[in-house]
Image (tube, rainbow, N blue to C red):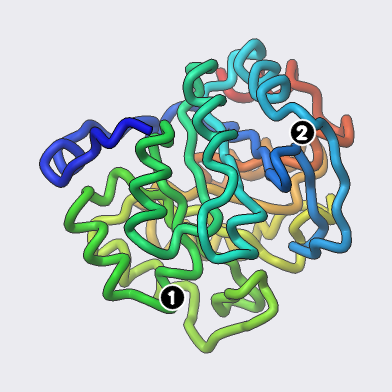
Amino acid sequence: MNEKLNKDSSATSPPSGRFRGFIIPAIDIIEGKCVRLTQGDYDQKKIYNEHPLEVAKEFEDAGLQRLHLVDLDGAKAGAVKNWKVLETLAAKTSLVIDFGGGIKKEEDLKIVFNSGAALATIGSLAVKNEFEFVKWLLTYGPDKFLLGADVKEEKIAVGGWLETTDVWIYDFIQKYIDHGVQQIFCTDVSKDGKLEGPSIDLYKNIISKFPKLHFIASGGVAAIDDLHKLKEIGCSGAIVGKAIYEGRISLKELTKINKN
């Protein structure tokens, strides 16, 4: 891999892909294949395509500009595993990719950036190792990160959602806004992968408390009406996964809402 990234270049790089389009399609990877889990359960895995590039190309051809790429093997192992998939998608599409899963050490972070990710997605580390994450924010710049908050009854959940902390979501967001983070996505773990609709009330509360935040909804989207509601309450973006793969929402519909 090209080891081009250094402190100076990364710290001054432009905020790539921060606000490109409302719709952010998701690709979750296990063993190089495009899959979806239900509520983060690896035993509830469904393979949708063995070639993630084909899926990414479909998104790009439909006019979508961003991609939320999740390394589920990496998340489980605590170290980035599917960086080759990231490298391929970054090289062969123009999608602005945020990549997460297994980024625990700076070595992993460098692999992610050197493989072509515009943004590194950070979740559990921001809860369990605040010192390290803040160091990265200072070194690379907050515009290089997408902060993920998994939530269960307004408390942060970590460890594949098996562990609920006593960290209140609003305190968590405020802390990292104070460190310069501007882009956060939030997943209600009770909704993810169940196609039961997003957590509108939770998101409304977050947006009302942090009106300047670039807030991205994640989890539960089941129909195009859900996306209209998320736009109406002030979400800046929405991550959509299972609803696409199950045919609940067409790429044509996503493209249309992305333009409006």
Q: Where is residue 64 in the image (x, y as percent from the top left)?
A: 58, 21
Residue 94's spot in the image, x, y percent? 48, 17
What residue is shown with label 1?
A: 127
* Residue 14 placement: quadrant: top left
Helix, strand or loop for disc 1: helix
Q: Is 173 above or below relative to 82? A: below
Q: Residue 25 at x, y = what percent?
A: 64, 34
Residue under label 2: 224
Quick check: marks 2 and 1 in contact, CB under 8 Å? no
Please, what is the three-letter code of the amino acid marked with disc 1? Val
For residue 95, side relative to residue 145 (left or right):
right
Instruction: Examine the image and state in which quarter residue 187 appears.
Output: bottom right
Q: Residue at x 65, y 39 (%)?
A: 26
Drawn side of residue 133 relative to residue 72, left or right: left
Numbered disc in front, either 2 or 1: 1
Disc ID at residue 165: none
For the point 66% across and 55% down, which residue is it?
73
The answer to which of marks 2 and 1 sits earlier in the sequence is: 1
